[in-house]
Image: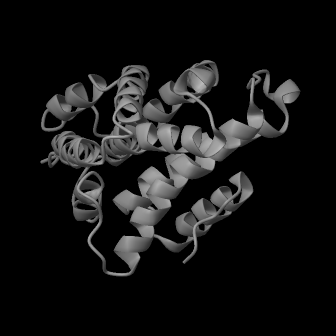
Amino acid sequence: MSLPNTVDGVISRLRDIDSGLPAKDGVAVFNRMYLTVTERVAAVIADPASAGTRFRDAETMAALDVGFANHWLAAIDDAAAGRRVTPAWRPLFEARDARRLSVQYAIAGMNTHIEHDLPIAVVDTCRTGGLEPDDVHADYETVNEILAQVESSIRRSFLDASGRAVDDRVGPIVHLLSTWKIDKARDLAWVTAETIWALRRTRILRGRFLDGLGHTVGMTSRALLIPAG
């Protein structure tokens, strides 16, 4: 299936995925959360006055939003076609049918998508648009403000829905998940984007760096998906 090239196309694909998967499927759990965030970002792009937040360069942020989302959609398509997904996404797809807290799937997915896919998408967007990373950094920080508005409610809804947050067996897991912070992950992703940008003319070293990044991020996601007992 071809990947979308507009924000509306991304949202349509995410909604199709949501409607076609069982609610407790780990892939569906992350996809549903990602849909919520993407709809919020789309609202800022389309109508900043109503959203109460404005991007300096909405066109570039729309391109980044699409490029970023397409990493997730490509992983979905690879899995659906029976192809091996990338090392960064592999833990989520391997654990999608196992017994995990829903919040584990959400945070493991965010970990992979932010710490692996986002820096690559930033660099690709800059190269395509003839920009430097510094040109998009202010709007990148604006996304942090948007995410801060939804992250706590998303975490709370997942834990409340599980009804297991006070269970002695899963208490250590909830504590582990509480150490993962989206703002810190995005700070690290920005440094990673700057590193990839600096390596853009060194093909061999850049390839080795990206390969190591995928496996390292995958290891963290696997740890976040430790069985819940």
Instruction: Indicate how the structure is coloured in the image.
Output: one colour
Residue pictured at 79% horizontal, 28% vertical: 51
Q: Which residue is nearer to you in this view: 148 or 199?
A: 199
Viewer can see residue 23? yes
Q: Position of residue 180 (x, y in %)?
A: 30, 26
**On the picture, is 73 further left or further right than 37?**
left
Q: Position of residue 129 (x, y in %)?
A: 65, 41
Q: Is residue 209 above or below residue 53?
A: below
Quadrant containing the N terminus is bottom right
Q: Is residue 210 above or below residue 187?
A: below
Residue pictured at 40% horizontal, 21% vertical: 187
Q: Is residue 9 above or below residue 52?
A: below
Name which quarter of the figure residue 112 lies in: top left
**On the picture, is 113 further left or further right than 165?**
right
Q: Position of residue 217 (x, y in %)?
A: 24, 41
> In the orientation shown, which residue stands out farthest toward the front?
201
Q: Which residue is nearer to you in this view: 81 or 15?
A: 81
**On the picture, is 117 further left or further right than 70?**
left
Residue pictured at 75% horizontal, 22% vertical: 53
Q: Which residue is nearer to you in this view: 165 or 181?
A: 181
Q: Position of residue 110 (x, y in %)?
A: 39, 40
Viewer can see residue 24? no
> In the orientation shown, which residue stands out farthest toward the bottom?
81
Total numbered badges shown on the rendered structure: 0
**On the picture, is 161 further left or further right than 149?**
left
